[in-house]
Amino acid sequence: MIKILFVCHGNICRSPMAEFVMKKLVEDAGLSDKFEIESAATSTEEIGNPVYPPAKRKLAEHGIGCAGKTARQMNKGDYAKFDLLIGMDSANIRNMTRICGGDPEDKIKLLLNYAGINRDVADPWYTGDFDATWNDVTKGCRALLAETFHETSLQ
C-alpha cells in the first residue's frame, strides 16, 4: 500500500483538491486497495474548517465529492506514517521539512515536479482562479499516479 499525504498552507483549497482528485483517479483505475490518501496543512489557521466553498464547487463540477473533510495540521508522526508527503508549493516544502525535522528518506516532494513542471501549484486563495488550480492539481496527480502505479505493479 502506498500512503500519500498532500499538504498546503491551510488544508482547505489545494491539498484537499489534490486528495480527492487522487482518490478519484485511483478509484477509476481500480487501485483503491493499493493507496491511502489524505491531506493536511502546515499552519493551524484553518484546523477543523471544511473545504473552502469554491474548491468544493470546483471538485463537484467534475463529479468529485469531499463531504466530511475538515482541515488538520500535519505533524512529525506523519513522516513515519506516509510514504510520500506532497507539497503544493515551495513554502509548503520548507514548512513540511521543518515540521518533520528534516527529510532523511527523501519523501517530501513538490506535486508539479511529477509532471515535469518546476513551479508551485497555482494558489486560488490569492487569485480566485480555481480553474488554474484544478489544472495544476490534475496534471500533478495524474503524473503521480502513473509513477506510483508503475511502482505498485512491480510489487
Image (cartoon, helix red, strand yellow):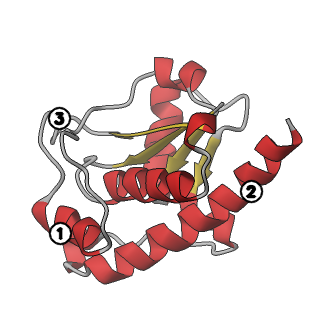
- Mark 2 or mark 3, whichever is nearer to me: 2
Q: Quadrant of the C terminus?
A: top right
- Is residue 64 at least partly visible in the picture? yes
- Residue 59 horizontal side relative to residue 137, left or right: left
66 lies above or below 117: above
- Is residue 120 at least partly visible in the picture? no
User: Which residue is more in the foreground, 52 or 20?
Assistant: 20
Earlier in the chain: of badge 2 and badge 1, it is: 1
Label 2 element class:
helix
Residue that badge 2 annotates: 147
Earlier in the chain: of badge 2 and badge 3, it is: 3
Instruction: Residue 47: give its label.
Output: 3
Q: Residue at x 48, y 17 (%)?
A: 77
Label 2, label 3: how far apart the Cα atoms are: 31 Å
Residue type marked 3? Ile
Residue that badge 1 annotates: 57
Q: Quadrant of the N terminus?
A: top right
Label 1, label 3: how far apart the Cα atoms are: 20 Å
CA neighbours of label 1 inside 10 A, class few (<14), some (14 to 19), many (20+): some
Which corner quadrant of the image does residue 53 belong to?
bottom left
- Residue 59 horizontal side relative to residue 27, left or right: left
What x and y, as percent, mark residue 5? Answer: 48, 39
Label 1 element class:
helix
- Mark 1 or mark 3, whichever is nearer to me: 1
Label 3 element class:
loop
Residue type marked 2? Glu
Find out whether the residues at labels 1 and 3 contact each other: C-beta distance under 8 Å.
Answer: no
